[in-house]
Amino acid sequence: MFTQTDDLVLLVTSGGKRYLLRLQPGRQFHSHLGSIKHNDLLHLPYGTTVHSQLGHPLLLLEPSLADRITRIKRNTQIIYPKDAAMLVQRLSLRAGSRVIEAGTGSGGLTIALAWSVAPTGRVFTYEVRADHFQVARNNLEKMGLLPYVEMHLESILNGFRQTDADALALDVRTPWIFLEHAHAALRPGGFFVALVPTTNQVSELLSELEKSSFADIEVEEILLRKYKPVPNRLRPDDSMVGHTGFLISARPIIDATEPGRWLSEERKRYEARQKLEKRIAEEEAHRADSGRKYPKLP
Amino acid sequence: MFTQTDDLVLLVTSGGKRYLLRLQPGRQFHSHLGSIKHNDLLHLPYGTTVHSQLGHPLLLLEPSLADRITRIKRNTQIIYPKDAAMLVQRLSLRAGSRVIEAGTGSGGLTIALAWSVAPTGRVFTYEVRADHFQVARNNLEKMGLLPYVEMHLESILNGFRQTDADALALDVRTPWIFLEHAHAALRPGGFFVALVPTTNQVSELLSELEKSSFADIEVEEILLRKYKPVPNRLRPDDSMVGHTGFLISARPIIDATEPGRWLSEERKRYEARQKLEKRIAEEEAHRADSGRKYPKLP
Amino acid sequence: MFTQTDDLVLLVTSGGKRYLLRLQPGRQFHSHLGSIKHNDLLHLPYGTTVHSQLGHPLLLLEPSLADRITRIKRNTQIIYPKDAAMLVQRLSLRAGSRVIEAGTGSGGLTIALAWSVAPTGRVFTYEVRADHFQVARNNLEKMGLLPYVEMHLESILNGFRQTDADALALDVRTPWIFLEHAHAALRPGGFFVALVPTTNQVSELLSELEKSSFADIEVEEILLRKYKPVPNRLRPDDSMVGHTGFLISARPIIDATEPGRWLSEERKRYEARQKLEKRIAEEEAHRADSGRKYPKLP
Amino acid sequence: MFTQTDDLVLLVTSGGKRYLLRLQPGRQFHSHLGSIKHNDLLHLPYGTTVHSQLGHPLLLLEPSLADRITRIKRNTQIIYPKDAAMLVQRLSLRAGSRVIEAGTGSGGLTIALAWSVAPTGRVFTYEVRADHFQVARNNLEKMGLLPYVEMHLESILNGFRQTDADALALDVRTPWIFLEHAHAALRPGGFFVALVPTTNQVSELLSELEKSSFADIEVEEILLRKYKPVPNRLRPDDSMVGHTGFLISARPIIDATEPGRWLSEERKRYEARQKLEKRIAEEEAHRADSGRKYPKLP
């Protein structure tokens, strides 16, 4: 595979710095290690070592999906590749899937979604802030993924324009207020995931999910532990990303007549324990009032 | 979306048990909660609650990708969805990718790979044991993914039959002895990942990768922390999967004339420190011999 | 050091099972590997291998502190050694410290506390349930630590009987309702720690701590990752304890006239951000009403 | 409790900065928030808010043990409080214990050990580098813990000067070459812990421990996850310490006639599996040579 005009390529320095660029005849790449002409990068096999005019070596690579997600211009929180990878799996995306996303942010997650559903699927993404919308649009265009994305510059307070979507990802501050809209936009049995940073948001979302027509609810967190790649001194990195967010996934179901039926076992046990404790407390209060001795309660 | 004949569906009990089945008119599903006819599951929207003949509710869902990876018959180690998700991302797979895998094992990872590259891509998978090969074949057929997989019942000791592959995943005990073959099968700049359970294997693999034409080496581990989905008592699960394996990723490059140039910064620092320490030790030995007082070394 | 009558000793089987016993002439130890007379365990150096009458080897050891904490009779949640270790450090305990604990539970944490402050310090522990109280008392007696503990079978709803304590540990369900009592029992600048399992409890406790006279508030969690001790196949255990509890530590201070002064930087930043967002929302609403075009807000 | 001359005190700024100082009449404390006279800090209750001459508030606290461990002058790797806490517990230290340590480094761990065994116990610590020795000595003196420590400026290559020690901590680069010396210095059944940063060191140490007279071998790692103490936005810190070191603990035993008897179950299973695999490989080779068909091996 040889590089060609318009290819998105990665240049890696011997110090590990990574630069993403789109090859254009006549252009030039500049860095602290010197410059190099795009023309000198064209028609080369990937994996070639090239040199800046100052003689510094640069490794020419095809950018990975993680490079594409993270090496974008952005004015919002980053989406971490580890979370994007898990989210794509939780949404069971594949070529042809129709997936909705809100908010677009800088488009990092949109890139991962579009990558997974292209070329026959579509991402429908919503963003309310015009500045974010424009940044995301540019990023998607740069990555060559815009053809697979339908962008909406509008609030989702009034719902989504799509129905029967296969999957839906909410990366907003208050996902719990959009559950009815999400349910309406998804096909029955589709895939729903929300991403929030705090435990309070998880609690609020869980609380609303339980009242809505969703089942198979799961909360999880992905931790990535990197190691220093030194064969004789193998050890985890000294510092790591400690937290990015919680992933809450669920499945929209056909309205259940018996609410609470599809709650998790944990959840039901908690409910049962609550009821038992309430009964014990009442019994204890009653006995205390009566002033009589009594045997230990379970 | 309505269920139809030959669909792979999931039945979830109110206790959270999950059953995977392929709908066939005339067949019957049996569990400890009673049985239900496949006919009664046909032409229903997903997300519907059905009932066994004993009156127990069952939730009818389309299986997620994670359900498909884990709910297979197997006589080997399982691949965890968290690792499969990260591996697919590290390999930058998408519709159309050509990816090689060895060994096939029970086919769990093969399912994840085929899911990601279908319908226009291909998985080429190698397995040396006939019993595993057959189990994996049945699993892939059951999941409807066999059309996207080319299975080889043979050792990779003599190399792979493919060239110019986009990506290659090694899930074998001694990945380091196959690096030349992997390099030959991958297109320059392709994506390589190995998965091993022990730190000793990581060290051996890193050591060989450094001697081969690979760059951009990374070692990482994915930890999944699940939470009990109880809004008023949110907390991580009491027990978690403590370890599955280490992911080592790298990129095959065009032969470098200067070995070690593309080692990680960490790795180079270690080398430099080793040299410095050796020099200091020699100097200290020399000074000790000379019997003179001396100022502190750095 | 030789074993003697009344010593608490540990017998370890070649399969790794651990048994705690107090040596008494004339008694006998029984297990599935056969029995052994206490007399045959007396006056031996620790680290000796003895044999059951069936010929099975048993390793005679002095129990570690972790053995003492965990090998007790109990009808409550266990305290994990990892948490006990961190708690003891967070409370800055040492010989001579006076530390208060509530509730006693089965006495596992009490053992760790008494171990740290003996022989010149004291643990004052409160338990409201008579059955737990008795179990804990027996455990402390068995461990030989009862002389260093003052046990109270009573509720702490009306406060603690001690004042000027060096440290205080709350292992109760609703620690936030006891903060005034805790403040009254501790010497100014003493050490306070609470241990709770859920994030909701952490939030409630933090909320109350901020309104009370406490400063230097920290929330943390200890994760213990064990490895299989196999030199050629080193790897973390397949499963691990995923969660035990959150440790919240704080210092009681002399009443501050300016509430919020000693909140953490994080906390203050959050407050500031909240205020800014409120102002922006108001401004946006105002502008929306006015119907005019406006430049982007920060 | 009121501050007095010679007390070690902590000043905390409203921004969370922490300063450790020893109160001396006539001295002055300086920081970017202004200065304050030690005289103005004397005879105050801990937990008092004082003000710099520029009007900035400072919280006067007794330093915690963690403050004492980390707020020292140092020219070596830091010991983290989390590791010190677990190490002290693994060594089962208490007032009166006699514990050996090598190397002293900057004395951080020595402080934790001395704190735990004072006033009746002793720490015997060895350091080969004169510069580290002096730094550690000053730190211990500043912390008021020097009376409980016996410092040796010498190598441990020829062994330790003590025998019958209760516990021994090795914080050196090659702990495996000192196992015989450690065994000789410890009382039978005493407590041994080593702390190393890399997996290669763990493997080497395990390998030597298995050949020496040690049993009850465990490898573990402590991870500390801090949370932002914000009640309405509770979440783990964005970044965390990813790795400090591995703790390997073991117990010296009376020479066993049957080596390998006290290896862990994991270790024995590994050995057994190795043997089985070797037998299967031989059988497979034999069958392959014979050219006959054969049934599947287990």
Image: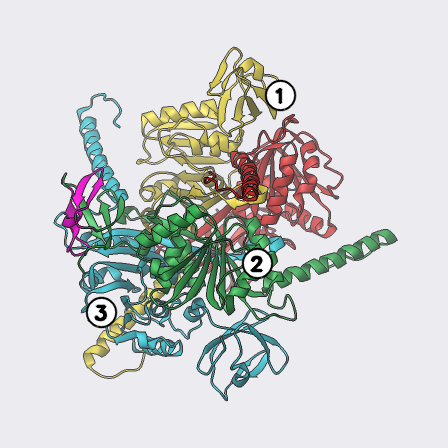
Chain colours: A green, B cyan, C red, D yellow
Q: Which residue is mark 2?
A: B229
Dot 2 amino acid type? Pro
What label sits on residue C123 in the rendered view?
none
Q: CA distance from mark 1 to mark 3?
A: 76 Å
Chain identity of mark 1: D
Quadrant where the N terminus of chain D lies? top right
In the image, residue B14 lies at what x, y percent? 59, 70
Residue drawn at (66%, 34%) of the image: C212
Q: Which residue is mark 1?
A: D2
Considering depth in this image, is B39 or C99 the residue closer to the camera?
Answer: B39
Considering depth in this image, is B104 or C135 the residue closer to the camera?
Answer: B104
Tag in front: 3 or 2: 2
Tag in front: 1 or 3: 3
Dot 3 or dot 2: first in sequence order is 3
Which stretch did the figure color magenta? A24-52
In the image, residue D199 lies at what x, y percent? 34, 49
Chain identity of mark 3: B
